[in-house]
Image (spheres, helix red, strand yellow):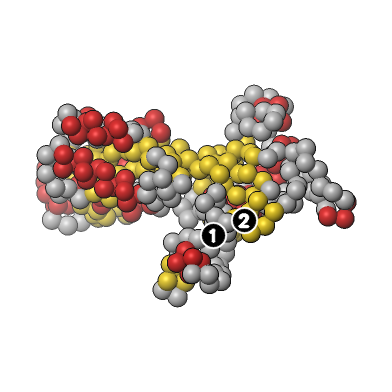
Amino acid sequence: MHGWIILDKPLGLGSTQGVSAVKRALRDGKYGKFKVGHGGTLDPLATGVLPVAIGEATKLAGRMLDSDKVYDFEVTFGVETDTLDREGKPVATSEVRPALAQVEAVLPRFTGPIEQVPPAYSALKVDGERAYDLARAGEEVKLASRSVVIHDLQILPGTGRGTAGEAGGGGGFPSRTPSVEPPLHQPAAGPPPRSGEDQITLRAHVSKGTYIRSLARDIAHALGTVGHVTMLRRVKAGPFSLDQAISLDKLEDAAKDRALEQLLLPLRAGLDDIPALSLTPDQAGLLRQGQVLAGVAKEDGQYFACLEETPIALVEALSGQVRVVRGFNL
């Protein structure tokens, strides 16, 4: 039992509870004791892909934390909350509702490298204390902006009163026109319009460290209004997607039937973007002892080193030498 179980985390469940569910399934199926960890925190109000590493795969969990993620999220305009999601208390309101075309036109401002200020209700530490603990205690939380990368940001088809296809002039994802910036409502122009969108659903492909709640807040502000996240679903984490994810019910049923291995993705699945390096038995023995392989004709970079079908190590090739980054005891 060394590999990955990908959960489709339900609403209201924390990531650590997801790990506990896998531990319980291993125990109920009498599989023995294995290390278990997750590859990226999901808030209880978020759903979707939660990679859970078992056994030697836990050595790759940190790498999974650093991977890109893809989220679908709904922004509801008109109210901003202190938590920037539907769990919080309102702190600002606005009558402005953006048109679908306005949303489409503003998204390029948030694509590529951007700076964002994390939510006050986050797990980041301020003077040794969690920001959300300070915020809950009524203290003012000031967090520094951070650099993140939004690789892609799109309106999901069928969102809003019209459809994204209609807004973009075609099917699928809408075309984006960075050069067009629609005029945003100004208070001096009189009562704001209410003919726009109350909600919009977006898909974002983001780098590690990106806060979707902050992204939603900033998009709303750029549209001359306020907003908060009312739905958040992770559809991809690193190489893992919803296609591979299972429900807690399926996990429990498999544990009862002692069939968890049928749900287990191999350790290699967490390194889908890493080329393989085939080893001889002698080379495998040297790497297992932590020694360096010399004279290996491979381009510089990371490799997944295997002896036939047995994973040996995640290695780094540099100038013809191969060193162990993470060794696997298999």
Q: Which mark is residue 90?
A: 2
Above or below: residue 45 compared with residue 253: below
Q: x and y percent of residue 186 in the render?
A: 83, 53
- Residue 224 shows in this picture: yes
Q: Residue at x 57, y 47 (%)?
A: 229
- Residue farthest toward the right in the current orientation of the protein: 189
Q: Is residue 208 left or right of residue 24?
A: right
- Residue annotated with mark 1: 119
Q: x and y percent of residue 272 in the render?
A: 34, 39
Q: Residue at x 48, y 40 (%)?
A: 233
**What's under tag 1, amino acid-wise?**
Pro
Q: x and y percent of residue 217 in the render?
A: 62, 53
Q: Nearer the viewer, residue 291 or 5?
A: 5
For discs 1 and 2, the disc positioned in front in the rendered view: 2
Q: Residue at x 18, y 41 (%)?
A: 26
Q: How many marks?
A: 2
